[in-house]
Image (spheres, grey):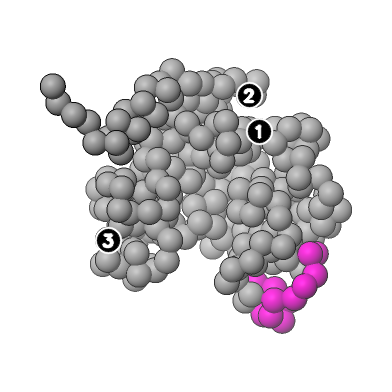
Amino acid sequence: MAIFKTATLIALLAALANAGHSADPGVGSNPKAEGATDKVTSKTGPNGSEDWLNTGITGGGWKPPYLALEDIYHISLDTFYDGIGSPCKKYDNYFQSAGSKYSIDPVILAVLAMQESSCNADAGGPTPGLMQVSCENYPNGKCTDSIQDNVNAGANYFHGQLKETGGNAIQAFGRYNGWFVAGSGLNQNKGLTEDYPCSSEGRSNGEPQNLDYVHQVLNGWLLGLDVYGDDNWIGTYKCDQKCGDGSKC
């Protein structure tokens, strides 16, 4: 009888447990998104399939399809706060202020804060606070202890990515997590490819990019699903921010 290694058996059991998982966020399917479905599965959801959102990463590099921010389906701010986003509710005035300043729906900022820091204003690291962006995005280019400055910095960064990408929200969300397209100078000047995160260059640039990120944000967090918790079945790469387990990230 063949004996499975523990890691292999765990992976198999996880795959079986995740098989058939789906969730219906009740928003319908986005007619502007390829492969969109009413229900969220590991591979698709209302804002398009993961293959579509990740266009190019299995070839010459990421070539994000286009969706404007106003075209993306998402739940309301109140619904988010009543569900997985409850830790973010106490910061609502900061999201409202930054959203007004940068013309971004506050729910987008709250979702980014939840995904980046689990809405922990005391989260540390080189990109501290709720929004986890570098200090150059703060007023005067310096980090401060102000929560409003932190949320403004995140909104400023995301707004800048929208502007630089011609309003492409898919690309802007990806860039928030370090995704890149051709011409960035990385990966032999190609866009992000699935073999990049765990390459020597990819690992030298810090934690590997999560290749499920765009799908998890657009078809998970924005639809009120807890990608870090009960809904961690969303995505197909299953990267644990490590490269030693055989995953591509």
The amino acid marked with disc number 2 is Pro
Q: Which mark is residue 25?
A: 2
Q: Residues within 10 Å of mark 2 (few under 14, many from 20)?
A: some
Give coordinates of residue 214: x percent, y percent: 49, 44
Furthest residue toward left: 1
Furthest residue toward top: 20
Q: Are marks 1 and 2 in contact (CB under 8 Å)?
A: yes
**3D distance between C-alphas at marks 3 and 1:** 33 Å
The amino acid marked with disc number 1 is Gly
Instruction: Magenta stretch: give its range.
Output: 137-148
Residue holding disc 3: 199
Callout in the foreground (3, 2)? 3
The amino acid marked with disc number 3 is Ser
- Residue 211 vs residue 97, the one in the foreground: 211
Residue 144 included in the magenta stretch of the image: yes
- Residue in the image at 44% along x and 36% along y: 235
Query: Horizontal placement of 45 versus 11: left or right?
Result: right
- Residue in the image at 34% along x and 64% along y: 203
